[in-house]
Amino acid sequence: MFITENKEHRLITQNFFDILEQNPAEINKKIAQSQNFMNAVRELIELCGDDPDRDGLEETPYRVLKAFLEYTEGYREDPKAHLMKTFDVDHQELVLVRDIEFHSMCEHHFAPFFGVAHVGYIPNEKITGLSKIARLVEGYAKRFQVQERMTTEIVEAIEEILEPKGIMVVIEAKHMCMCGRGIKKSNASTVTSSVRGIFADQPDARAEFLSLLQGRI
Ligand SMILES: Nc1nc2c(ncn2[C@@H]2O[C@H](COP(=O)(O)OP(=O)(O)OP(=O)(O)O)[C@@H](O)[C@H]2O)c(=O)[nH]1
């Protein structure tokens, strides 16, 4: 059976891309790409030594497609847009949102990497909703990523939209491409940071930020 013959898959894929309100030619292209992808997953199953038509695997190409569209939801939004709604609150000191969980996908192996982001900024008149900081992290996590780029993208978005006096982002993550395969170091975790403004210029400000993360990284 070729996946392209499965009308249900075609319909659901079409609905998914219709929701994004792209033009019909673009939707048809996406449907064709989705079908090619599902056929490729069948090939992969066979290449690895299993039968793509057996009961448990029959629906797998479609499940993989759906999963990948979910892993990469960030491409279909502008994460910065979450920061546009700001509040007029007179707060001149640190705002730190800790332990923002995220799941991302390493662009080298398409293996998951996941962990927490700690995002802090010192406002300069503009304050955004706390949940919007977490939405920003999600928007950059749900892409094919490397941890360093994700860290920088979060900082640059806050810098551009909120224009704060300082920003510091610390991310700690486990990379599955280093656990079950390759070097197989399951306990290794990676910490990245990016700083701007006061946090870049003043070691005391950085130290205060890091003291609030004690025991977390
Ligand atoms: N800097 C950085 N490296 C990453 C990230 N995610 C995965 N990698 C690394 O990307 C590298 C890709 O190396 P390659 O030599 O091209 O691929 P490979 O042969 O599969 O490498 P091994 O994992 O060492 O087996 C590996 O060292 C991964 O650990 C990330 O977020 N940041």
Image (tube, grey):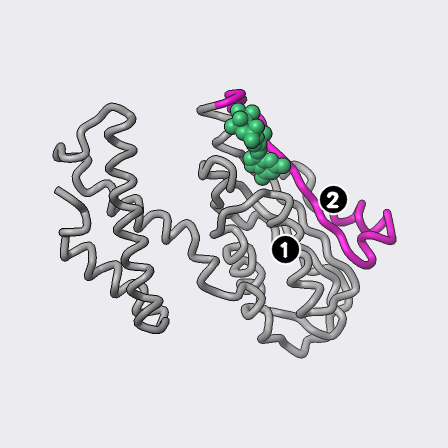
Quadrant of ligand 1: it is top right
* Quarter of the view holding residue 214: top right
Along the horizontal axis of the image, is 180 left or right of 20?
right
Q: Measured from the top left, where is residue 28 in percent x and y?
A: 29, 64
| Residue at 60% in and 49% down | 150
Nearest the viewer among 38 and 60 is 38
Q: Nearer the viewer, mark 2 or mark 1?
A: 1
Give the residue type at disc 2: Leu
Q: Residue at x 59, y 74 (%)?
A: 84
Q: Quadrant of the C terminus?
A: top right
Q: Is residue 91 one of those drawn in magenta?
A: no
Nearest to N terminus: mark 2 or mark 1: 1
**In which quadrant will I find the N terminus?**
top left
Residue 105 in picture, x, y percent from top left: 48, 43
Residue sitting nearer the eye, 8 or 140: 8
Residue 208 located within the stretch drawn in magenta = yes
Do the residues bearing badges 2 and 1 touch, measured as CB atoms within 8 Å? Answer: no
- Which residue is labeled 1 in the image? 153
Give percent across and percent down for residue 172.
60, 39
Is 103 displayed left or right of 119 in the figure? left
Residue under label 2, please give it. 210
Dividing the picture into quadrants, the one containing residue 134 is bottom right
- State the SS at label 1: helix
Q: CA distance from mark 2 to mark 1?
A: 20 Å
Q: Residue placed at 31% from the left, 66% from the top?
A: 27
Camera-nearest residue between 145 and 39 = 39
Q: Which residues are magenta?
A: 182-211
Disc 1 residue crowd, few under 14, some 14–19, many 20+, Cα 10 Å: some
Mark 2 Cα shell of 10 Å, populated few (<14), some (14-19), many (≥20): some
Mark 2 residue element: helix
The vertical placement of 18 against 56, above or below, is below
The residue under label 1 is which amino acid type?
Glu
